Amino acid sequence: MAKVLGVGGIFFFCEDPKALSSWYQEHLGLPIDPSYGGCAFQASDMPENGYTVWAPFTQGSDYFKPSKKDFMMNLVVDDLAAALAQVKQGGAELIGEPESHEYGDFGWFMDPAGNKIELWQPKS
């Protein structure tokens, strides 16, 4: 039987893709490729304890709030505190307080398109 090996991409609608791509490039350093407005992350770029999670949530869960979208992205970062400061400086609304768990530290913000984004710094 064929099987899934990982997440191959995150694709979503927004009103101004070029502006949102530029915002992420400026405030989180995403290496945006101007030929298509997105970026590719290589497995070798992940920290030693980084991995990708696939997880359906129960309809109506509060975890994505205050976003009204029915998805949430999680992005791996190398410095959670600095990343949260950068997005706040870029006008993002920080959501809640950062949390620390055995598998890493987390923080949340709303991006300019109204998406709730979770940032994760894996434990080293």
Image (cartoon, rainbow, N blue to C red):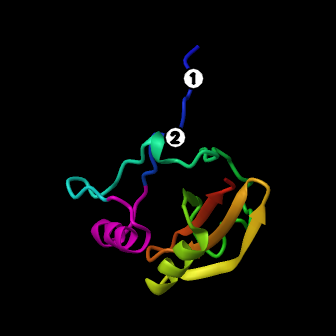
Q: In this view, does 101 lie to the left or right of 49?
A: right
Magenta highlight on residue 64: no
Give, as a single range, the part of the protein colored magenta.
Answer: 12-31
Q: Which residue lies furthest to the top in this view?
A: 1
Q: Residue furthest right?
A: 102
The quadrant of the rendering that contains the N terminus is top right
**Which amino acid is tagged 1?**
Lys
Q: Is mark 1 on a helix, strand or loop?
A: loop
Query: Residue placed at 44% from the left, 45% from the top?
Result: 9
Q: Quadrant of residue 117?
A: bottom right
Prevailing secondary structure class for the magenta stretch in the rendered image: helix
Q: Which residue lies furthest to the left in this view?
A: 35
How far across and down, in percent of the image, does residue 112 sit? 44, 77
Q: What element carries label 2?
A: loop
> Circle 1 sits on which residue?
3
- Give the CA distance from mark 2 to mark 1: 12 Å
Q: Quadrant of residue 48?
A: top right
> Circle 2 sits on which residue?
7
**Which amino acid is tagged 2?**
Val
**How crowded is the residue under tag 1: few (<14 C-alpha within 10 Å), some, or many (20+)?**
few
